[in-house]
Amino acid sequence: MRAVVFVDYQNVYHGARDAFFSPSDRSSLGAVHPLALGRLLASRGLADTHLHQVRVYRGVPHPARDPRAHRAATRQVAAHQAEDPALVKHVLRPLQYPPAWPRERAREKGVDVALAVDFVAMALEGAFDVGVIVSTDTDLRPALEAITVRGRAPKCEVAAWQRADKRSPRLSIGPAPLWCHWLTRSDYEAVADHTNYARG
């Protein structure tokens, strides 16, 4: 069975920080290697499941407005892509800057929509047998509903960080069964990316 893992990168990063770290911890904590995460999730599927692709969705800072952050993001994307160009696919969207920037932070725009569109389109095309969305963004629910309501392949799953001391958020779609891969602190350590891409 072909598994495609759809990674909402900033949601995964902030979710890991919220689950396992404090705001004062260094900013690199929470980052993951998407390929390692994809392989981990595929290994927990059925016996004949193999990782077909990891698709990473994220915003990228503007090179003129925030050149340091842009360089760091570009280095990170290149490093993750180089781990296996045949398996890793990045879908990048420019960050949106409010008029009050930098007092107000730049925000991602269209990342969740791009993920949702690709998830539905690839499911309808038969591009995967198992699709795993790694995000807790509720804006992705309609995409899951659109495919699961069909009552046939492909199989839809989600993944979320498992917090030790409080309720852990996850994507769900009401009464419909939707398998969640709960990821623990030890899982995070197995896929963590500790590189400081701001250097250099």
Image (cartoon, helix red, strand yellow):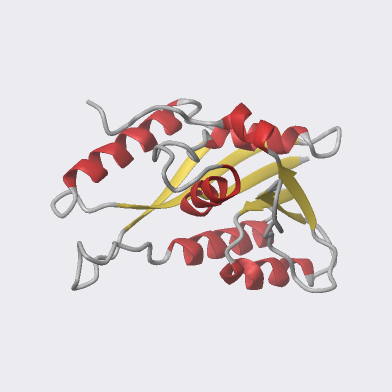
Q: Is residue 49 left or right of residue 193?
A: right
Q: State the residue at coordinates (56%, 45%).
A: 16
Q: Which residue is more in the foreground, 99 or 39?
A: 99
Q: Is residue 152 left or right of residue 35?
A: right
Q: Is residue 21 left or right of residue 200?
A: right
Image location (x, y in percent) of residue 95? 30, 59
- Asked if residue 83 is positioned above or below residue 92 in the image, the reply reads above
Q: State the residue at coordinates (53%, 42%).
A: 21
Image location (x, y in percent) of residue 134? 62, 51
Q: State the residue at coordinates (66%, 36%).
A: 185
- Asked if residue 174 is positioned above or below residue 30 in the image, the reply reads below
Pick the quarter of the image with the N terminus. Answer: top right
Farthest-out residue, left: 64
Determine the image quadrant of residue 121.
bottom right
- Asked if residue 108 is positioned above or below residue 54 in the image, the reply reads below
Image location (x, y in percent) of residue 92? 38, 51
Q: Is residue 72 left or right of residue 85?
A: left
Pick the quarter of the image with the C terminus. Answer: top left
Q: Which residue is more in the foreground, 65 or 157?
A: 65
Image location (x, y in percent) of residue 36? 59, 30
Q: State the residue at coordinates (39%, 40%).
A: 27
Q: Which residue is more in the foreground, 99 or 168?
A: 168
